[in-house]
Image: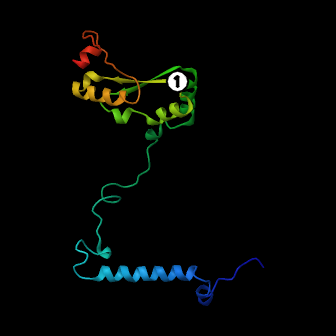
């Protein structure tokens, strides 16, 4: 009562272009594929049946259990604390390491502030610029300044540093 019987082949062929048409199109496509793939000289790079993996999973890398160390910083508690700090702040300083700008720039923070707190001011601080060549620091400051106000920073007791020193 409520359980449908599986359709027989006759029922499938009589369903007016539904599954029968789909099955027929799939069979034609398979036949065409096999015909093209079996011709000599048509597929000079090899047949699908004799492909050998030269890169990817199992060759270059493999899945392993992530160490708990790499999962640190992903807890809700930490993000909740971040959201509290953003709520209480008028200006947010996003400190970015000049040695690895893409790795230390958190676009998730930028998107959150742009979407949920557009009245807040986000300022990039490019840190440790004394550890990279001047041309690298100049380019990153120019790149980051297109999106947000950017300040270059390095700490040194003996060498003063200012905007003029970077530009010259």
- How far across and down, in percent of the image, does residue 140 sit? 30, 29
Task: Pick whichever, 54 or 95, lies toward us.
Answer: 95
Residue found at the very far right of the displayed protein: 1
67 in relation to 1, above or below: above
- Horizontal side of 134 relative to 69 (left or right) equals left
From this viewpoint, is residue 99 visible?
yes
- How far across and down, in percent of the image, does residue 56 sit? 33, 58
Q: Secondary structure at mark 1?
A: loop
Residue found at the very far bottom of the displayed protein: 10
43 in relation to 106, above or below: below
- How far across and down, in percent of the image, does residue 125 sit? 38, 23
Tell me if mark 1 has few (under 14), some (14-19) or many (20+) residues whose alpha carbon lies within 10 angstroms of its own: some
Rendered-image quadrant of the C terminus: top left
Task: Pick whichever, 13 or 133, lies toward us.
Answer: 13
Give the quadrant of residue 42.
bottom left
From this viewpoint, is residue 133 visible?
no
What residue do we see at 37% from left, 27% from top? 96
- How far across and down, in percent of the image, does residue 70 sit? 43, 40
What residue do we see at 41% from left, 52% from top? 64
155 in relation to 133, above or below: above
Rendered-image quadrant of the N terminus: bottom right
Structure colour scheme: rainbow
| Mark 1, residue position | 120
- Horizontal side of 46 relative to 74 (left or right) equals left
Give the quadrant of residue 8.
bottom right
- Horizontal side of 104 relative to 1 (left or right) equals left
What residue do we see at 30% from left, 65% from top? 53
What residue do we see at 41% from left, 80% from top? 30
**Numbered disc total:** 1
Give the quadrant of residue 162.
top left
Task: Pick whichever, 134 or 2, lies toward us.
Answer: 134
- Horizontal side of 127 relative to 90 (left or right) equals left
């Amino acid at each position: 009562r409520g359980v449908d019987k599986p359709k027989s082949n006759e029922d499938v062929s009589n369903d007016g272009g539904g599954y029968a048409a789909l099955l027929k199109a799939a069979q034609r496509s398979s036949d065409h594929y096999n015909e093209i793939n079996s011709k000599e000289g048509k597929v000079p790079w090899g047949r699908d049946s004799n492909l050998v993996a030269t890169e990817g999973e199992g060759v270059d890398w493999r899945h392993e259990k992530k160490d708990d160390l790499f999962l640190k910083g992903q807890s809700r508690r930490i993000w909740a604390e971040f959201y509290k700090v953003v709520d209480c702040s008028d200006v947010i300083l996003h400190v970015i390491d000049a040695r690895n700008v893409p790795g230390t720039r958190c676009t998730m923070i930028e998107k959150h502030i742009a979407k949920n707190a557009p009245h807040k001011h986000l300022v990039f601080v490019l840190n440790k610029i004394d550890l990279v060549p001047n041309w690298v620091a100049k380019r990153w400051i120019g790149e980051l300044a297109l999106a947000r106000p950017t300040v270059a920073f390095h700490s040194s007791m003996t060498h003063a540093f200012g905007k003029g020193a970077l530009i010259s």
